[in-house]
Image (cartoon, rainbow, N blue to C red):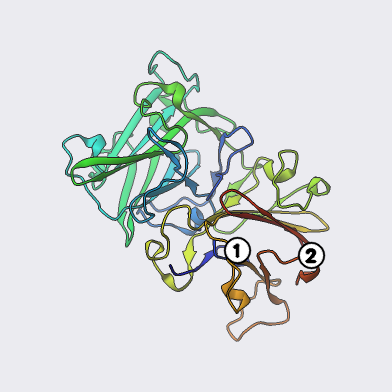
Amino acid sequence: MKKAKLISLLLIIVIIGAYSLNATMDEDGVLLVPVVDDTPIIDGELDNVWKCVTATRMDSVEGGGIAVSTNNYDDHYSKFRVMYDEDYFYVFVEVVDDQLDVTAADPWNKDCIEIFFDGGNEKTFEGYDDNDVQWRWVLGQDNEDDPSGGNYAWDTTDVGFNFEIGIPVDSLEALDLALEEYHEFGFEISNNDGDDGERKEVKHWWTADGNTWQYAHLFGTGLLLSEDDREVEEFLDIQYTEDGDDIVIDGIMSEDEPWFEEGVATLSPNEVEGGMARDTLLDTDGDKDYIFKLLWDEDYLYFFYESYDDQLDVTAADPWNKDCIELFFDGGNEKTFEGYDDNDVQWRWVLGDNIDTDPSGGNFAWDTTDVGFNFEMKI
């Protein structure tokens, strides 16, 4: 299997040997939905503003529990992003699927996206109440048939398809869901994979229970953030922390550290170096994935990286071909075409490097996990 570099917006950050794990969620698993300043174009293409929103994996396989799917990566892999403004709730879904199929008799067995809301977050056990809803969009479905009354688009990609939608405030207010800061609501999203006219697999964000179509207590919870918490724009906003002294550089993201403060952006990879298709590089969705977080105060820039990587490997002859992390800075943001100037730098850390080899002169730590590894540092 080939290895690749995954490139994210920023500095730039490049992670080698690693492809969002935990979403923008708090310690209780509440999905934190940021407010957006730059409205996306609803065309199924990943705008720059979407690249500054966390991509959240759908890892709960219906009927099978919360685990990395055993299917090949190119067979079925799903992740989503959410944000809002005063007029719309936006959702962007990326699906890897090697067989696009809408031939099943029932729409829920076709390739489709389903979104669930419980506007009042009551999560009743007796069935849906008046502010609960399940909406479904079948791949290729015409925009005029939108059950939410919104505007959506499909885009067929080299590895599957994208789905983008703006759900209007009027449709959500009918569910008692006001697009206002700190409104808490029930939420779930799922993606069915149909192959050969039959359902093959359903992936959810929150639950592995297939009864979300009738019971709202199975939904997760979403929270609309304020502009002060985090406002998404077409550049990476790095949050200031007053609690940098509470960060212990040990490769472990503890709940009492400011990594879990509301508004701390959790970001994920958007590009593959060289433009290679991910399904040609990855065997399963546990092969390569990652998120990262950034904070700053007057003394340090703090960085935390968390990966899926099913084969930790530092045996290559050249350090840049080993499992490693690279950070790139352009201090003045000039972005010169002639090569690096005096305020440009590339730093690399190879998995397992010790503190004495830190090229930035900072402090860092590795932690090997059940699914890969973590890297934490302050510069």
x and y, in percent, of residue 10 in the image:
60, 63
Q: Quadrant of residue 309?
A: bottom right
Compared with 203, 375 (above or below) is below
The residue depicted at 47 percent of the width and 46 percent of the height is: 57
- Extreme residue toward the front, this view: 315
Q: Quadrant of residue 202?
A: top left
Horizontal side of 88 relative to 251 (left or right) equals left
Tell me the residue that label 1 is attached to: 10
The residue depicted at 58 percent of the width and 34 percent of the height is: 29
Q: Which of these two is toward me, 96 or 61?
A: 61
x and y, in percent, of residue 325 in the image:
63, 66
Q: Circle 2 sits in a helix, a strand or a loop, which is it? A: helix
Tell me the residue that label 2 is attached to: 355
Compared with 254, 28 (above or below) is above
Q: Which of these two is toward me, 76 or 11?
A: 76
x and y, in percent, of residue 199 in the image:
25, 39
Split into 4 quadrants, where in the image is the C terminus?
bottom right
Is disc 1 surrounded by few (<14), some (14 to 19) or many (20+) residues within 10 Å? Answer: some
Q: Earlier in the sequence, mark 1 or mark 2?
A: 1
Q: Which of these two is toward me, 334 or 328?
A: 328
Q: Are marks 1 and 2 in contact (CB under 8 Å)?
A: no
x and y, in percent, of residue 9 in the image:
56, 62
Compared with 283, 177 (above or below) is above
Q: Gap in Å between the C-alphas at discs 1 and 2?
A: 25 Å
Observer-side mark, 1 or 2, equals: 2
The amino acid type, in three-letter code, at marker 2 is: Ile
